[in-house]
Amino acid sequence: MAIQIFNDQNVIKLNLFKIRSYLPGIENKLRLSRANTYSVIFTDDKKIKKLNKNFRKTDRPTDVLSFKNSPKSADIFISAETAKGNAKFYKQDFYREILRLVIHGILHANDYTDYTEKAKKIMWEKQESILKCFISSCI
């Protein structure tokens, strides 16, 4: 499998079986090569804040960080705490938000950016169209 899931936090209860059930669809929709490995690591706000400070010089938690280790490998850190807060704030289902962040992190690992308005529009349109497929079962 191209995407692997790890839970490195105990603040938010996660249904890893449910999250893993989405992975084949994500791999299919993003046309991910099975030769590539994406490690999705669920963490807490404290740990992601430290990563964000060390690598982005931003001293606050964030929802997702992607680190490309090589052309065929990336680590994607997702704060389960921030995801839970985002879901509540935007009135979204928690697992829909988790799915959005997994997709977002993988897009970053595949050189999509959201640092300019134009790039953000392209990335977010792709992300939301993939997410919509899961909601309306177009996988």
Image (spheres, rainbow, N blue to C red):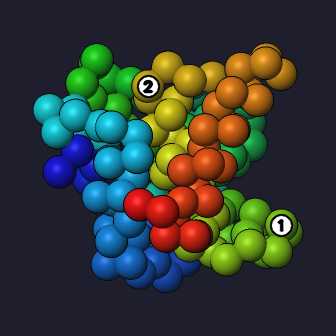
Q: Secondary structure at mark 1?
A: loop
The disc at residue 12 is none
Q: Quadrant of residue 46?
A: bottom right
Q: In whole angstroms, how far apart are the C-alphas of marks 2 and 1?
A: 26 Å
Q: Position of residue 110 (x, y in %)?
A: 44, 25
Q: Position of residue 121 (x, y in %)?
A: 76, 29
Q: Is residue 66 left or right of residue 32?
A: right
In the rendered image, the vertical position of residue 1 relative to residue 8, given as above or below: above
Q: Position of residue 53 (x, y in %)?
A: 64, 31
Q: Mark 2 or mark 1, which has the lower sequence index?
A: 1
Q: Quadrant of residue 31?
A: top left
Residue drawn at (24%, 24%) of the image: 72
**Residue annotated with mark 1:** 90
**Residue annotated with mark 2:** 110
Residue drawn at (68%, 61%) of the image: 82
Q: Is residue 81 visible?
A: no
Q: Residues within 10 Å of mark 2 (few under 14, many from 20)?
A: some
Q: State the residue in front, 13 or 47.
A: 13
Q: Quadrant of the C terminus?
A: bottom left
In the rendered image, the vertical position of residue 32 relative to residue 86, given as above or below: above
- Given the image, on which type of amino acid does mark 1 rest? Tyr
Residue drawn at (32%, 48%) of the image: 28
Residue drawn at (56%, 24%) of the image: 112
Q: Residues within 10 Å of mark 1 (few under 14, many from 20)?
A: few
Q: State the residue in front, 64 or 19.
A: 19
In the rendered image, the vertical position of residue 18 relative to residue 106, given as above or below: below
